[in-house]
Amino acid sequence: MKCKIKQVRLGLLLGLAAVIFIGGCVSKLNDTQTTGVRKDSKTMAALKAATPIIAIKEYEKMLFGKMTADYVGNENCLKGCHVHDKLALDFKSSTMGDQLKQSSSGMMIVDCESCHGPASELMASIVGLKVEVASDKIAIVKAHRENLLDYETLPAGAKSLICLKCHTANSTFNLHNWNGSSHAANDVTCSNCHPIHAGADLIVEPRAISTLCLGCHVTNAAQFSLPSRHPVKEGRMYCTDCHDAHGTSNANNLREMTQRETCGRCHTEKTGPFLYEHADNMEQCSTCHSPHGSINNNLLKQPVTFLCKQCHAHHMNTTATNPNQLGTSSMSYTRCTDCHSMIHGTDTPGTNANPTIGGSFTR
């Protein structure tokens, strides 16, 4: 009897130990999951937090450079520094570098210090230092950051303002909407798209535009790989055909006021005006079409029948002449465009004479 009691007690103890062990594991797992959720919550909260808008005047203060320094000219900036030779050659052959020639006032229009700030104190701080010596190289880099504009620490708005000082007034680019654009709001700067020192041509080539835009807009890049798509990756059209990267007053930086006008730049036969139009759908092409790409034909958001049924759920296919008999007819699941071929609009009345049915967009 005593042996049985001992066995029962031992069993209970082992069972209790197992429960404690499993409970501890579950608790630890829950703590880990909770910690992960908390971290994700903190991250999301940080992303959703309001960021104060800095006034342009505050950005302008960042671009003065050292008020005690003076301008020394390009020759002094480039003298004895072979690291800058390639940059100087590319810059001189660029559109801006072409303006290095002296103007009628005897002053250069654009030079190194136009963007980097006055350099006299920098020159004084690096006298005797050599790039070939490791310790001197570190000192030279430090002197540049302390005496010139430090581009690595400048906020995006200030970087863009360096370019806008000249380009808002003296260039043909459409830049008057830049400060209110979605790119500027997301801290995209001019130099993210225009490589100032990379070569002679500062304007992005048309065939490079798609690669440049899709490097950030990865969702659209995936859509351009779907079976039905606009031929952007094929180089037959470009993102800038529809959007103005520098900003517009229109939604999604569209070049025209409405989607209809923007799409109508190419699809003129769909814009009308028509005597019989497809209600309000004519103003928003994206009601039916996915503008970048789709798995359905003609960039449709859904297959034809299911797309049309979203609005015309009770449409019947019948030859009945009595309107009261329409409810007994079966619904049609063939392609709507087999009959309604002029779905965007037409000037010709339909073939169906029944006024309750209309026969719209059939010819």
Image (tube, helix red, strand yellow):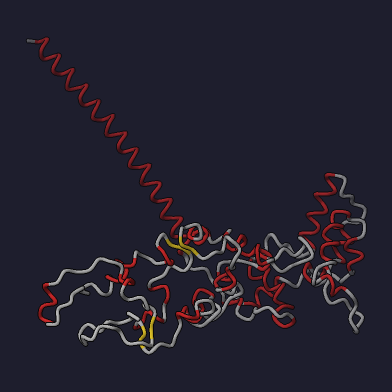
Q: Residue at x 27, y 82 (%)?
A: 359
Q: Is residue 133 above or below residue 317?
A: above
Q: Judge left or right: residue 111 versus residue 210.
A: right
Q: Quadrant of residue 56?
A: bottom right
Q: Judge left or right: residue 289 versus residue 156.
A: left
Q: Residue at x 72, y 72 (%)?
A: 162
Quarter of the picture holding the C terminus: bottom left
Q: Residue at x 63, y 65 (%)?
A: 209
Q: Residue at x 58, y 73 (%)?
A: 241
Q: Judge left or right: residue 250 versus residue 123.
A: left
Q: Judge left or right: residue 49 versus residue 162.
A: left
Judging depth in this view, the residue of 50 and 77 nearest the camera is: 77
Q: Residue furthest left?
A: 1
Residue 93's spot in the image, x, y percent?
84, 66
Numbered label tally: 0
Q: Quadrant of residue 92?
A: bottom right
Residue 223's spot in the image, x, y percent?
48, 60
Q: Is residue 19 above or below residue 147?
A: above
Residue 174's spot in the image, x, y percent?
65, 79
Q: Is residue 240 above or below residue 268?
A: above
Q: Quadrant of residue 99?
A: bottom right
Residue 68's spot in the image, x, y percent?
83, 71
Judging depth in this view, the residue of 329 and 251 nearest the camera is: 329
Q: Residue furthest bottom?
A: 275
Judging depth in this view, the residue of 323 and 136 nearest the camera is: 323
Quarter of the picture holding the N terminus: top left
